[in-house]
Image (cartoon, helix red, strand yellow):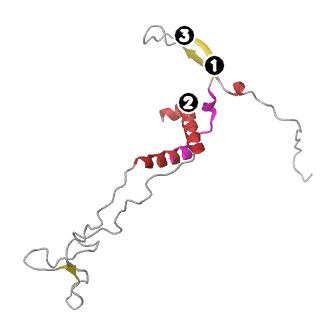
C-alpha cells in the first residue's frame, strides 16, 4: 500500500435487475366517463414502456433530423447559358479600362458594358449551380431508430418538454 486508503473490491456478481423493477409505475386512466371531467380516477397501473429509459442524445437527434430534412429537397440550377448570351470581347490594354470582355456594337447603353464575368451586371454567376449536386443523405437505420427512441424518451421528461 502506498499511503492510499484501503479499498475493498468485492468479487461478487452485480445484482441483475428485472426490467419491470427499474421502470417506474404509471397510472392508467379510462377514456370512458364524463367528458372533461377533472375528477378522473385511475383504473390501474403499469410499468413505463422501456423506450422512455433510452439515453437522451440531442446531438444524434439533431444530426438525423437535419439529414432527413435534406431528403425532401428538389434539385435546382441556373441555365448553363445564363450570363453568356451576348457577343462580347475584351478591348485589350491601353484604353484605361479593365480587360473584362465588353459588349460589342453601338447605339444602346448596353454596348461597351462589361459582360460574362461574375462581377459584371448581367454576367454569369461564380460557380453556377448544377443539378448533380448531392441533394439527399443516407442515414443508418439503427441511427434513425436510436434518434426516435431518444426523442420519445426526451418527451417523457416534463422540464424538457416545457423548455
Label 3 secondary element: loop
Residue placed furthest toward the right = 1
Q: Earlier in the sequence, mark 2 or mark 1?
A: 1
Q: Nearer the viewer, mark 2 or mark 1?
A: 1
Q: Categorize mark 2 by other alpha carbons within 10 Å: few (<14), some (14-19), many (20+).
A: some
Please give the residue where the numbered disc 3 appears in the rendered image.
41
Q: Percent position (x, y) of residue 97?
A: 21, 84
Eyeballing the image, is 2 above or below 99? above
Residue placed furthest toward the bottom = 94
What's the residue at 45%, 52% (across, down)? 136
- For the record, the magenta segment spans 49-62
Please give the residue where the numbered disc 1 appears in the rendered image.
46
Based on the picture, tell me whether residue 115 belongs to the magenta stretch: no
Q: Considering the whole magenta stretch, tell me its main secondary structure.
A: helix
**Tag 2–tag 1 contact (CB < 8 Å):** no
Front-most of 66 and 72?
72
In 3D space, how far apart are the residues under numbered discs 1 and 3 (Cα atoms)?
15 Å
In the rendered picture of this protein, how many numbered marks are placed on residues?
3
Q: Percent position (x, y) of residue 83?
A: 25, 69
Residue placed furthest toward the left = 107
Please give the residue where the numbered disc 2 appears in the rendered image.
156
Q: Categorize mark 3 by other alpha carbons within 10 Å: few (<14), some (14-19), many (20+).
A: few
Label 1 secondary element: strand
What's the residue at 47%, 46% (across, down)? 68
Eyeballing the image, is 11 above or below 116? above
Amino acid at each position: 500500500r502506498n499511503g492510499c486508503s484501503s479499498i475493498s473490491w468485492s468479487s461478487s456478481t452485480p445484482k441483475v435487475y428485472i426490467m419491470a423493477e427499474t421502470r417506474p409505475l404509471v397510472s392508467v386512466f379510462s377514456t370512458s366517463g364524463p367528458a372533461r371531467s377533472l375528477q378522473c380516477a385511475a383504473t390501474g397501473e403499469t410499468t413505463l414502456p422501456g423506450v422512455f429509459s433510452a439515453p437522451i442524445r440531442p446531438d444524434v437527434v439533431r444530426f438525423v433530423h437535419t439529414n432527413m430534412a435534406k431528403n425532401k429537397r428538389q434539385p435546382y440550377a441556373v441555365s448553363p447559358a445564363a450570363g453568356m448570351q451576348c457577343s462580347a470581347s475584351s478591348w485589350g490594354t491601353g484604353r484605361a479600362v479593365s480587360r473584362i470582355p465588353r459588349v460589342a456594337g453601338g447605339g444602346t447603353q448596353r454596348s461597351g458594358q462589361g459582360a460574362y464575368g461574375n462581377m459584371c451586371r448581367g454576367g454569369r454567376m461564380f460557380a453556377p449551380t448544377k443539378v448533380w449536386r448531392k441533394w439527399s443523405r443516407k442515414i443508418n437505420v439503427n441511427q434513425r431508430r436510436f434518434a426516435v427512441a431518444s426523442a420519445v424518451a426526451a418527451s417523457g421528461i416534463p422540464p424538457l418538454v416545457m423548455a
